[in-house]
Image (cartoon, helix red, strand yellow):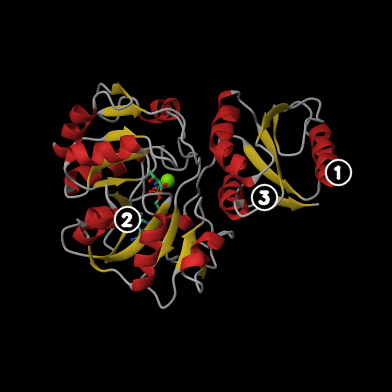
């Protein structure tokens, strides 16, 4: 299949038509690139799973162009859900609500709930508008790879497998949306992201993290968010997180570099460049920069054929949970505290 490349907003009507006709279009959002299809077309949803190699029990997020359109997809919006919608949509938050009959079971992997998000990215919203339907879209990576934060990343994973890619430049946030389950007794955050727990507490004081956010899920467990149990974000390199204060982290990484002579070593640094014999990429000093740079850095290490990555980490601010959730998964939970 030939994959068309569209620049920005230029071909948005054509891109919208492709979606309306049951095709697949990758598009930028403020978080990561999405791989979109009509949420009302179960055949198109199946094509998403095929293009990504995604397990069929992992549901998709449905994207809308105006927050109020959530009422076309859901039977019941709780008062807490409404508060979150009012405060943070459009933006980097997804709410899980009870779905109505219009959304195909192929989109929600058979669940009776649906994940809904209204992105703030103008190209994304224009695409949804042009297509005339809500757009079901997971991140536009091959299942298991780091999420794409540039059109180049999407091209690397999806060229030849989908109808079109819209190039809207680099994504601002760099990690996926915060997912909030609003269907239980209290709201829980199933995936941390750019809208932090502290921000959510301003409008829903008793909201809390789901317990599975930064731990490995066992083989036979059934987490709330099906995506939690899959190996995610894993680059080809073997990733280790070295967590702690500056001096200790640097000493530990230098020790490990000398132990691994002969391998191609990469360091994702937060503190500074004090390493010989490693390819260095900067994560940025704060959590927000780390989130923005993380997936691109993991993909860059792969491009450079790095065998082992040591990632410096410390919990700097409100973004720490969003970074940690992805970083720990990328490292398959190989975390060394020093
Ligand atoms: O920022 C984002 O959210 C990006 C952009 C493209 O919008 N999308 C994204 O989609 O990250 P994806 O498919 O990579 O991650 C969606 C996560 C999965 O872990 C999935 O299991 C969970 O959302 N999910 C979807 N529907 C759900 C539901 N009804 N209940 C619980 N979890 C759900
Ligand atoms: Mg994903």
Left or right side of 286 for 100: left
In the picture of the structure, the residue carrying the numbered disc 2 is 116
Rounded to the nearest angstrom, the CA distance separating label 2 from label 3 is 32 Å
The residue that appears at 67% across and 32% down in the rendered structure is: 282
In the picture of the structure, the residue carrying the numbered disc 3 is 334
SS type, badge 2: strand
Rounded to the nearest angstrom, the CA distance separating label 2 from label 1 is 43 Å
SS type, badge 1: helix
Farthest left residue?
21
SS type, badge 3: loop
Q: Position of residue 284 (x, y in %)?
A: 66, 37
Q: Position of residue 22 (x, y in %)?
A: 16, 38
Rounded to the nearest angstrom, the CA distance separating label 3 from label 1 is 20 Å
Badge 3 crowding class, 10 Å Cα cut-off, few under 14, some 14 to 19, many 20 or more, is some
Is disc 2 in contact with disc 3, using a CB cutoff of under 8 Å? no
- Of pointers 2 and 3, the one earlier in the residue sequence: 2
- Of pointers 2 and 1, the one earlier in the residue sequence: 2
In the picture of the structure, the residue carrying the numbered disc 1 is 247
Left or right side of 210 for 181: left
- Of pointers 3 and 1, the one earlier in the residue sequence: 1
Q: Position of residue 229 (x, y in %)?
A: 47, 57
Q: Quadrant of the N terminus?
A: top left
The reply to whether residue 221 is in sight is no
The residue that appears at 34% across and 66% down in the rendered structure is: 82
Left or right side of 148 for 326: right
Q: Nearer the viewer, residue 134 or 224?
A: 134
Badge 1 crowding class, 10 Å Cα cut-off, few under 14, some 14 to 19, many 20 or more, is few
Residue 277: which disc? Answer: none
Within the image, what quadrant is residue 279 found in? top right
The residue that appears at 86% across and 41% down in the rendered structure is: 251
């Amino acid at each position: 299949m030939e994959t068309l490349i569209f620049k920005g907003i230029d071909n948005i009507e054509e891109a919208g038509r492709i979606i309306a006709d049951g095709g697949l279009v990758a598009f930028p959002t403020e978080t990561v690139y999405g791989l979109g299809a009509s949420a009302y077309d179960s055949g198109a949803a199946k094509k998403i799973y095929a293009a990504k190699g995604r397990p069929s029990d992992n549901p998709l997020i449905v994207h809308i162009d105006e927050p109020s359109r959530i009422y076309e997809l859901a039977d019941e919006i709780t008062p807490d859900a409404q508060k979150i919608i009012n405060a943070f949509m459009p933006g980097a938050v997804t709410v899980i609500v009870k779905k109505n009959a219009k959304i195909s079971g192929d989109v929600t992997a058979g669940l009776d709930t649906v994940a809904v998000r209204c992105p703030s990215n103008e190209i994304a919203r224009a695409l949804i508008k042009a297509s005339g339907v809500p757009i079901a879209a997971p991140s536009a990576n091959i299942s298991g790879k780091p999420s794409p934060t540039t059109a180049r990343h999407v091209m690397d994973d999806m060229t030849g497998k989908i109808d079109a890619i819209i190039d809207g430049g680099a994504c601002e946030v760099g990690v996926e949306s915060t997912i909030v389950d609003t269907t239980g007794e209290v709201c829980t955050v199933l995936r941390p992201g750019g809208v932090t727990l502290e921000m959510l507490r301003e409008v829903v004081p008793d909201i809390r993290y789901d317990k599975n956010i930064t731990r490995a899920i066992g083989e036979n467990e059934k987490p709330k968010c099906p995506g939690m149990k899959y190996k995610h974000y894993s680059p080809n390199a073997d990733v280790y997180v070295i967590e702690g204060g500056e001096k200790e982290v640097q000493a530990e990484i230098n020790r490990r570099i000398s132990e691994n002579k002969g391998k191609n070593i990469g360091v994702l640094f937060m503190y500074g460049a004090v390493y010989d014999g490693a390819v260095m990429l900067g994560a940025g000093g704060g959590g927000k920069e780390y989130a923005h740079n993380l997936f691109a850095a993991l993909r860059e290490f792969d491009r450079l054929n790095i065998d082992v990555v040591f990632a410096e980490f410390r919990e700097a601010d409100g973004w720490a949970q969003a970074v940690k959730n992805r970083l720990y998964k990328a490292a398959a939970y190989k975390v060394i505290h020093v």
